Image (cartoon, rainbow, N blue to C red):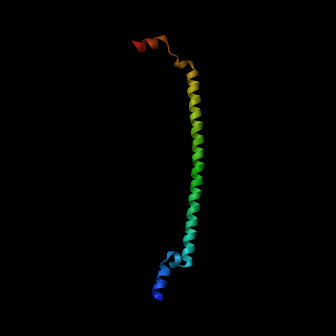
Amino acid sequence: MASPGKDNYRMKSYKNNALNPEEMRRRREEEGIQLRKQKREQQLFKRRNVELINEEAAMFDSLLMDSYVSSTTGESVITREMVEMLFS
C-alpha cells in the first residue's frame, strides 16, 4: 500500500485542501468584492443607457419639430422659374 506521507501529499494537493482556512477566506472575500463591483457597474451601465436613449429620443423629436417648423414657413417655396431652370 501507499505510504502515509504519500497519502498526506495527495490530500493536500486535492482541490482546496492544500490551502489554509485564512487563504480560502481571503479568496472568497475577493470573489465577493469582484461580484459586487461587476453588479454595480452593470447597474450604472443600465442607468446610463436608459438616460442616453431618452436624451436621443428628445433630440430626435426636437429635430423633427425644427424641420416641421422650417417647412411650414414661406422660405422654401418652389417657383415656376425654379422648375424651368431644373429642366433646361
Which residue corresponds to the image point at 60% horizontal and 37% vertical from the top-left?
A: 58
Q: Residue at x 57, y 30 (%)?
A: 64
Toward which corner of the image does residue 73 lie, by quadrant? Answer: top right
User: Splitting the image into 4 quarters, where does residue 40 fall?
Assistant: bottom right
* Count of labels in the image: 0
Image vertical order of residue 72 relative to residue 55, above or below: above
User: Viewer-proximal residue, 1 or 43?
Assistant: 1
Which residue shows up at 55% across the image and 66% down it?
31
Image x and y of residue 71, in percent: 56, 22
Looking at this view, name the residue that lies furthest to the left. 88
Residue at the image position 45 percent from the left and 13 percent from the top: 83
The quadrant of the rendering that contains the C terminus is top left
Decide: is 64 above or below 46: above
Quadrant of the frame with the N terminus: bottom left
Picture layout, residue 29 above or below residue 2: above
The extreme front residue here reads: 1
Residue 84 location (% of width, % of height): 43, 11
